Image: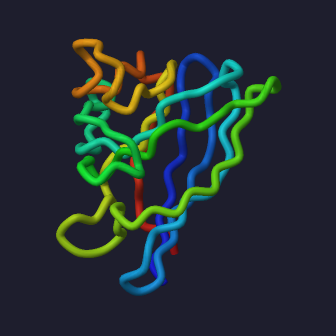
Amino acid sequence: MVKGVAVLNSKDGVSGTVYFTQEGDGPTTVTGNLSGLKAGLHGFHVHALGDTTNGCMSTEHGAPEDEIRHAGDLGNVTAGDDGTVTLNIVDSQIPLTGPNSIIGRAVVVHADPDDLGKGGHELSKSTGNAGGRIACGIIGLQG
């Protein structure tokens, strides 16, 4: 089993820890908790790069269930009235090993809902029109 972890922080008080586990060539399970969010939907993505020197980089987004999508398109997470999210996502396009590994990339929480590339906005295909990047962290291997 391979394990990864990302610790998310922001200047706006959003924080959390996201865990990634993968057994063999099976799907990757994403678990963890986020806090400090406004209630409602927030885009949740693995971005192409892990360079946070100038903030987190965007990639084109789709929906997790779409046939044509980018690997890091994990759709939305829903924060409750208390501003927290409990993550439990299983996805087969975010491996922790091999040439398409997400280790070293950034996981990003956006301010607004991801329209899953279907909103008709000029940013729908590039960012899911998910708004600002309110928290991010680099995915590293976990022992």
Residue 85: which quarter of the image? top right
Q: Residue at x 64, y 50 (%)?
A: 87
Furthest-right residue in this view: 82
- Indicate whether 8 appears above or below 93: above
Image point (45%, 62%), residue name: 91
Query: Does 105 appear above or below 98?
Result: above
Report whether 8 appears left or right of 59: right
Q: Residue furthest top?
A: 121
Residue depicted at x 33% and y 27%: 118
Q: Please say if 74 is above or below 78.
A: below
Q: Quadrant of residue 96?
A: bottom left
Colour scheme of this structure image? rainbow
Q: Is residue 25 left or right of residue 89?
A: left
Picture mark count: 0
Return the x and y of residue 73 as percentages of the image width and height: 36, 44
Which residue is more in the foreground, 119 or 46? 119
Instruction: Tell me if 81 is positioned left or right of 109 in this view.
Output: right
Q: Residue at x 52, y 36 (%)?
A: 76
Residue 63 appears in which quarter of the rendering? Answer: top left
Considering every residue shown, the one lying at the far left of the view is: 99
Q: Nearer the viewer, residue 29 or 108?
A: 29
- Residue 116, image x and y in percent? 38, 32
Residue 127, horizontal then vertical, whole percent? 30, 26
Q: Position of residue 136 (x, y in %)?
A: 45, 35
